[in-house]
Every structure is written in structure tokens, then in C-alpha cells.
Image (cartoon, rainbow, N blue to C red):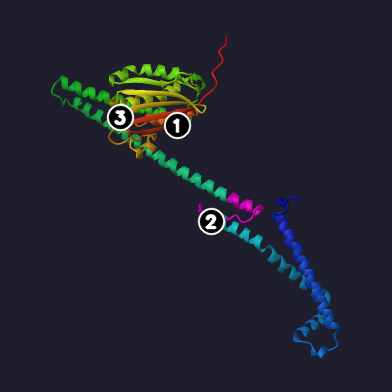
Amino acid sequence: MNSNVINTVRWKFIYAFLLSGILTAAVLYGGSRVGQSILEAQTYPNYSVSAKGIRWLIHNIGSVPLMIVVGALGFVLFFFLFSRKVMRVLDEITAGIQEVAKGELSHRIEVKTSDEFGVVAASINQMAEQLQLSLQEERNAVAAKNDLITGISHDLRTPLTSILGFLEYVEKDRYQDEIEMRYYVSIAYEKSLTLRRLIDDLFEYTRVSGGSLPLSLNALNLNSFLMQLAEEFAPMLEDAGMTYTIVGGQEPLWILAAPGELVRAYENLFSNAIRYGSQGKVMEIGLALEEEEAVVRISNYGDPIPAQDLPRLFERFYRVDKSRSRDTGGTGLGLAIAKSMIELHHGNITVYSENGRTDFVTRFPVIDPPVLRK
């Protein structure tokens, strides 16, 4: 018989029942032999007190009723002893369920058996762990929502305060001449553009990270895609006193992508490289095939990002102090949008920064080149 079938609660109770019956029968047989020997003995006056008591019971109650009572009591006692271990496990499971019901989700029941009770204990532990994770995720979601609201409020209030301040100067004629008025209006206009850019980025981030962005994925040659995008950034590179160079990319790298959406991710990475790497004078775009993955490396040269800031660089509204602040024109959402967009394309992004060089590395699974129809 299968050992898994034998090692069940049902069979353990059957074993306890059989053993209790066998031991009860043995006790009754032994008792009957002792009683018979007492009845057949002739030296009645020399009986011990216990023997006299047994003889009295037999004569006044009867041997059959006496054996029934002793057998019932013995069977219950033996069954209790043999099933005690199983019932102890049930008591522990019950106590564990009560702890979980009280909200002690960190409580775990020790799994001592591999029978049904062991499965129940493991299932309860798994349920408690899932509830604990769900509760933690809910708390994290609430904290993230509060952080998002706080970040949005802070970032919207800053340019809006400047806009209202300079427009107040104009409204109350607190300027000396038209030149100063135009200066105030110009500042308000620039702050309005910053505010619009922040709102656009916020909308884009919400759309991407919320999973409401449907993607129509098609075969895309990543080499030509990035080369064309780099050419479009030539004027911005020129304004920053920079150039770009492409390393590798001799062989086409085909991936599944939605070009209109993926371009948003690389626009943010290119803009980031230009904004913070102008002192290095060059933006490097590396293309390579590594272990069935298309690898793109966007590199810039300048002040490295501190190691403690690297793990949080893709968080929304996170900015590295000093060198990566709002003063440089970023909204704090660009890299978060880039990460979410790349992950929607089944890719991943990492960042490395040391020795005056910062690399943003993206990886995508490659596909076979599409077959051209004649």
C-alpha cells in the first residue's frame, strides 16, 4: 500500500483503534484468568483485600457486566493515549488559527507531520504569510500614494508660486518700465513651461506605471531606431557643446517594441545624458548582442552619481542632491517613466556610475529578423 496513504490521520486513528482493542482484549483475558483463579482457590480466608474485593464484585455484579465496564474504560484509556499525539497537533493548529484570527500574522504553526494536519498547518502558514504580504503591500501602496501626492504638491507649488509672484508684480504695476515688465512675464512664461512639462510627465508616468497603456508590439531594428533618434538630438547636443558616438551595432538587433512608446524612454535617457554630462562633451551609445539579449548602453562623462543614490535613481521625484536637482530642468519623473516603459517592453534597465562615467544599460530579448515578403 502506498506509504502516503498509510501516513494519514484516518489510518492513524485506525491504528489507535486496533491497538486499543488488542490491549483491551489482552487486559480482559488476563483479568478473566485472574478472576477464575480467585474463584477456584479454596483458601478464601487467606485472600488479600484486593482479591476479596474482586470476588465480591464477581458474585454481586457478575463477571460479564464487570468485564464490559473494565473493557470500555480500558479501551477509552488506551485510545486516548494512542491518539494523544494526533490530538496535540490538532490543538496546536487550533491555537495557531486563533492567533492569526487575533491579527498575529507573523505567527507560524510548526509542521510536525506529513499527514492531513501537516498539510492544514502548512496551508495556514502560507495563508498567514500571504495575508501579511498583502497587508504590507497595502501599506506600501498607501505610503506610495501619500508620497506621490506630497511630491506632486511640492513640485507643482514651486513653479506656480513663481508664476503668481511675477504676475502679481505685473498686475499691481510693480515694475519700472516695459523692459522690466517683459522680464517678469518672461520668467512667468518659463515657469509655466516647467509646470506644463511636469504635468505632462506626471500624466505619462501614471499612464505607463498604471498598466493602462496598451502596446502594439512589432519587430523593430534597435540599431536604426537609436541612430535616427540620436540624429534628432543633434541640435540639443550642439547647444550643450556635445557630440554623440555609436559603438558597435554592426549587426542589426531585432526586438519586439512599439516605437512610438519606446522612443519616450530613450528620449529621457538621452536628455538625462545631455543634461548631466555636458562637461564630458560626448554621449556614447553602445550596441551589442549578449546572450540572446540586445544591450544598449547610454553613457555620459562627468560627475559620478554617489553609490548610495544609485538604487533610488528610478524612483519618482527622486533627485540626487546638488548635481541632479530641479535647477537643471528635470522633473524627477523622466527616469521613472523610462524604467516603466522599458519594463512594459519586457526589458530591464540598470545604472552604473564610477570614475567619472555614468552608464544606463537597457536589455531586451532579441527575436529573429522578420522575413521580407517579395
Can you identify the residue that label 3 sits on?
302
* Up/down of 92 relative to 2, above or below: below
Residue at image position (39%, 38%) is 311
Helix, strand or loop at mark 1 = helix
The foreground one among 144 and 335 is 335
- Magenta includes 264? no
x then y, percent, for residue 333: 37, 31
Q: Amino acid at mark 2?
A: Glu
Badge 2 or badge 3: first in the primary sequence: 2
Give residue 99's mark: 2
Q: CA distance from mark 1 to mark 3?
A: 30 Å
Q: CA distance from mark 1 to mark 2?
A: 37 Å
Which residue is more in the foreground, 360 or 130?
A: 360
Q: Quadrant of the C terminus?
A: top right
Residue 108 is a magenta residue: yes
Mark 1 or 2 closer to N-term?
Answer: 2
Q: Secondary structure at mark 2?
A: helix
Cα distance between the residues tagged 2 and 3: 56 Å
Q: Residue at x 73, y 53 (%)?
A: 6
Camera sees residue 132: yes
Q: Magenta span covers which residues?
A: 98-124
Mark 3 is surrounded, within 10 Å at the Cα level, by few (under 14), some (14 to 19) or many (20 or more) other residues, namely: some
Residue kind at label 1, given as amino acid type: Ser
Q: Which mark is residue 209?
A: 1
Percent from the top left, x then y, of residue 356? 32, 31
In the rendered structure, which amino acid carries the disc numbered 3? Gly
